[in-house]
Image (cartoon, rainbow, N blue to C red):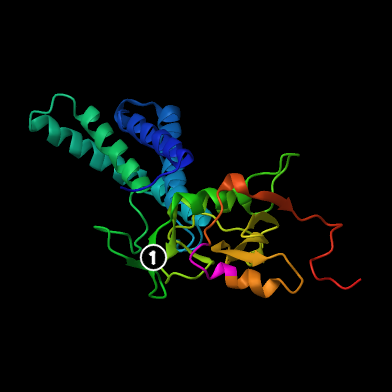
Amino acid sequence: MTSISSGRLLRLTVAAGAVGALSLIEPRRLGPWTRAAYRVGTAAVSGLLVADTTTEEGALLDPTLDGLLGGGVTLGLMDLSEHLDHRIVGGLHRLGVSRPRLLLAGIGAAGAAVLYLVQTPTWTERGGELAPSEDGQATVEMPEQVRALIAALLEPPVDGGDHAGAPALRTQLDSTRIVEVDSGSSDVMLVVERAEHLAVPWNQTWPVTGRFDQGGFCFSLELQIDDGRLGMLSVMVLDEDERADEALEFLDRPGYELPTPQAITLHHESESEEPSGALP
């Protein structure tokens, strides 16, 4: 089943309602001003649909410019569109459809919904099989524990505000899978199948880490951002003494497991803080 966020579901509902409502209007019965408003409204809805359902990877120019282009084309073809609308309604009447506009409204609303539900052509999981990523690596569904850990790192600070790029990264979570690797790796490679928005800066280590203790060692969860997308969830060793080698060995042992979101302590970088390992 296609995963869809609550925000996207809301936009789907609004878009389907707008398209359905416009389909109920009979353009031939409108006056000059109301007809002009109808045409502008139809073009605006068309442009917004294109902009909102086009991904960065699938855009001809970019989603916003594609939306403007789509709206302009729709407005320019309104004479032809209204002529076809008249022919279709007349044909449905002749076929015995008592309320052709209601039927067209339902079809239009369903079509708008499909634009939000149909995924950008990517590899997806079917029948429990592993789906390869763009570089040929096999991917699987992201475990809920990993998703919850990443979501915790992306949460806005309690003192208000938000980190640059956080809203874009949060929208990527619903379409993110992980690379299937052999046991013994503490890092989780992430593959974003649909990136509607990209984080800026494109390449960075996320300024929020999650610290936790396990096996008598101190670790830190770090989130890597690659090309504006979620890239990797890494486990770093905080101990900087002779126990660092032991901590790394512990990560390779069968007893190691990712912490729960409740077990980590969030640490936010600040401008006054020196990077770890910085020279005095």
Q: Is residue 13 above or below residue 5?
A: above
218 lies left or right of 258: right
Crowd around label 1: few <14 · some 14–19 · many ≥20 (10 Å): many
Would you say residue 254 sits in the magenta stretch?
yes
Residue in the foreground of this view, choosing between 122 and 264: 264
Q: Is residue 273 magenta?
A: no
User: In the displayed image of the protein, which residue is found farthest to the left?
Assistant: 95
Task: Pick the residue in front: 193 or 237.
Answer: 237
Apparent side of residue 280 relative to residue 264 in the rendered image (left or right): right
Q: Residue at x 19, y 38 (%)?
A: 88
Q: Position of residue 220 (x, y in %)?
A: 66, 60
Residue 114: image location, x then y, percent: 31, 45
Query: In this rendering, would 120 be left or right of 276?
Result: left
Pointer 1: what residue? 139
Magenta stretch?
A: 250-255
Q: Residue furthest right?
A: 280
- Circle 1: residue type: Thr
Q: Is residue 132 visible?
A: yes
Element type where label 1 sits in the image: strand
Quarter occupied by the C terminus: bottom right
Residue 245, percent from left and from top? 66, 75
Point out residue 242 in the picture as x, y percentages from the top left corner: 74, 74
User: Which quadrant of the figure has residue 213?
Assistant: bottom right
